[in-house]
Amino acid sequence: MQQVPYRPVQFRDDDLPTALERSAAWLRAAQQWLGEPLDVIAVHLDYDDRAGSAYYEVKLLCNEEDLAGAPLAVQRAELTADMPLS
């Protein structure tokens, strides 16, 4: 998509608000873990409203390079290790 490598992250539930809340919670946690905003290229919504098998699926298409980044905790540990002792 737009010549950017992406990784889909999917959330499926039997109601749309729950699927959206789960995707938002994951996005917040991922951004906190990485220590920077995550580049979401697109959001795709799919649903099946047949009786007995209803579901909503929210798919976030995230920049692959962002998800491959080092978490903030690792970056901080590396900075601390590089600091000279006084």
Image (cartoon, helix red, strand yellow):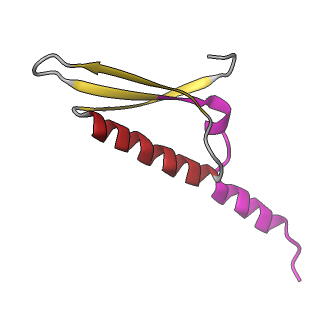
Q: List the single residue furthest toward the bottom.
A: 86
The relative height of residue 23 versus residue 81 in the rendered view (above or below) is above
Q: Is residue 62 in the magenta section?
A: yes
Give the quadrant of the N terminus.
Answer: top right
Q: Nearer the viewer, residue 40 or 69?
A: 40
Stretch in magenta? 60-86
Q: Is residue 11 left or right of residue 30?
A: left
Give how far across and how far down residue 78 sits, in percent: 76, 60
Residue at 15 percent of width and 16 percent of height: 50
Give the quadrant of the C terminus.
Answer: bottom right
Give how far across and how far down residue 67 sits, in percent: 61, 37
Q: Quadrant of residue 41?
A: top right
Give how far across and how far down residue 35 sits, in percent: 64, 53
Residue at 69 percent of width and 16 percent of height: 3
Total count of labels: 0
The relative height of residue 85 versus residue 70 in the rendered view (above or below) is below
Q: Is residue 18 in the magenta section?
A: no
Q: Quadrant of residue 15?
A: top left
Q: Is residue 28 left or right of residue 21?
A: right
Q: List the single residue furthest toward the left.
A: 52
Residue at 79 percent of width and 63 percent of height: 79
Residue at 36 percent of width and 44 percent of height: 21
Q: Is residue 37 left or right of residue 78?
A: left
Give how far across and how far down residue 81 sits, in percent: 79, 66
Q: Nearer the viewer, residue 40 or 82?
A: 40
